[in-house]
Image (spheres, coloured by chain):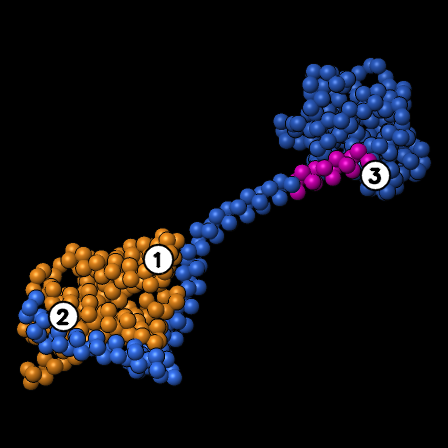
Chain colours: A blue, B orange
Amino acid sequence: MKSFLKSTAFRALVIVVVLLALGSVLAGFLPSGTTPANAVVSALFSPLQQAASLAAKKLEVFQLSFQNAAALAEENKKLQEENEKIKQDLVDLDQAKQKIALYEEFYELKTQNEDFKPVVASVVGRAPDGGFATFTLGRGTAHGVRVGCPVVSGKNLVGTVTAAAANNCTVTTLLSPELSVGAYALNSSESLYVNTTKELAAEGLTRAPGLAKDSMLAPGSVVCTSGLSGLYPRGLIIGTVTELADNPETGYVQDAIIAPGAVINEIRDVFIITAFDGMSDAP
Amino acid sequence: MRKMQTDTTKYKHTLAVLAALLVLALLQTVVGALPRPWGATAFLLIPAVVAVGMAENELPALLYGLFAGLLWDCGALGNNFHGIFLCTLACGVSAFVRRKMFSTAAVALLLSTLAVFGYLLVDWLHAGAVMATLWTHTLPSFVYTLLFSVPLYALFQGIANRWRVRSMMH
């Protein structure tokens, strides 16, 4: 290392260090407070620093975006979970609203018919063919349900129980050609009966066949259960006449096409009336 | 003709080293230019000057160190501490490597470790030797800075080899 101490580089180093040290001391006496070397280099370097700073700010935005990608993914996942929960809440709310509407309608029916003994039931299964002629309810004989009990949605007749097990029962609805219900028209008190055909059932409609040509029924007439058979209480709404059509079998009478009051293909909850005044004991 | 080619090569080499130091100074001094993991600052100019010292002869190393130090001091108007520190470091490393050691990446890492340790120790003591800053700034900066040691060594060796400065200057 002795050779280094004797070298030009070492002498230069000493000179530079001394000059820099003197510059530092001198800075204390100068009004600018800066060393001459700093002043010169700053004049050249500062614009570059400013430009680099601007670039860094732009780069920083990119870096932040990049760094936040993982956080954003996590947040996105959380939001999706919240979204799913909100969707579920909306479904629950919708179901609750439907139930409230159902109970409100039935409350009105119940206040008008205090003799009704209702059992609330949910639809737990559809007919195997996917149609709406029958469906299964989650209530059975253990809940007082028996064959022949009418099933209603609010004030509207849905059908009747045609099979009952301990904890479930099968309902044959107005959209089954096998069901026939004694009825009357509200506007004329005209007696009639309501059933359906496969064709009409496919469209969600029923009919009151065999009406005389001078029948008072007209589109908009409301058809209700007559209660004469003892199978249904009197006054349950079956549906509303939508049109009158010539009977294809006889030609001299006409059929009233009736849209059921209950939207049978959308029903989720119903009431089974297990007892009412005048109820027939026979299934 | 040969003299002209040699001069051009020297200028290119000098410009390359100065440009590299300038960029490193900007990266080090400009806020946001480099990420600061765990509050660490990368003092790039220290391992850079070590690498320059290992790649250059003493006098050029001294001048490059001076240049780097003055750039660093731009942010600290009023003293030339970094100028003194870096020109001494560059010149000292160059003299040491010329006489006592081989120029390898491991040596660059070792010398950088000593230089960064010395600098951060002085800096920490100067800042009042607060224990909290030792963990939140000084030690992370020490590790972070050393991460750049070998790449910077490779960079300045590459510049030196590209223009074959040493063979021409010997």
Kind of element beneath mark 1: loop
Amino acid found under the numbered disc labelled 2? Glu
Q: Give residue B103's quadrant in the image.
A: bottom left
Q: Is residue B19 above or below residue A206?
A: below
Residue A237 shown left or right of residue A81 in the figure: right
Three-letter amino acid code of the residue under disc 1: Ala
Q: Indicate which label's residue lies in the foreground, 3 or 1.
A: 1
Quarter of the picture containing the C terminus of chain B is: bottom left
Tell me whether marks 3 and 2 sit on the same chain. no
Callout 3 amino acid: Thr
Snapshot quadrant of residue B37: bottom left
Measured as percent of width and height from the top left, residue B155 is found at 20, 65
**Category of crowding for the residue at label 3, using alpha-carbon neighbours closer than 10 angstroms: few (below 14), some (14–19), many (at least 20):** many
Residue that label 2 marks? B56
Q: In the visual, does B115 lie left or right of A70?
A: left
- Distance from Cα at disc 3 to Cα at disc 2: 103 Å
Q: Point out the tag, 1 or 2, that comes first from the N-terminus.
A: 2
Q: Residue B129 shows which numbered tag?
A: 1
Q: Residues within 10 Å of mark 1 (few under 14, many from 20)?
A: few
Q: Secondary structure at mark 3?
A: strand
Instruction: Establish if B165 lies above or below A273.
Output: below
Please state which of residues A24 and A139 is positioned toward the viewer in this rendering.
Answer: A24
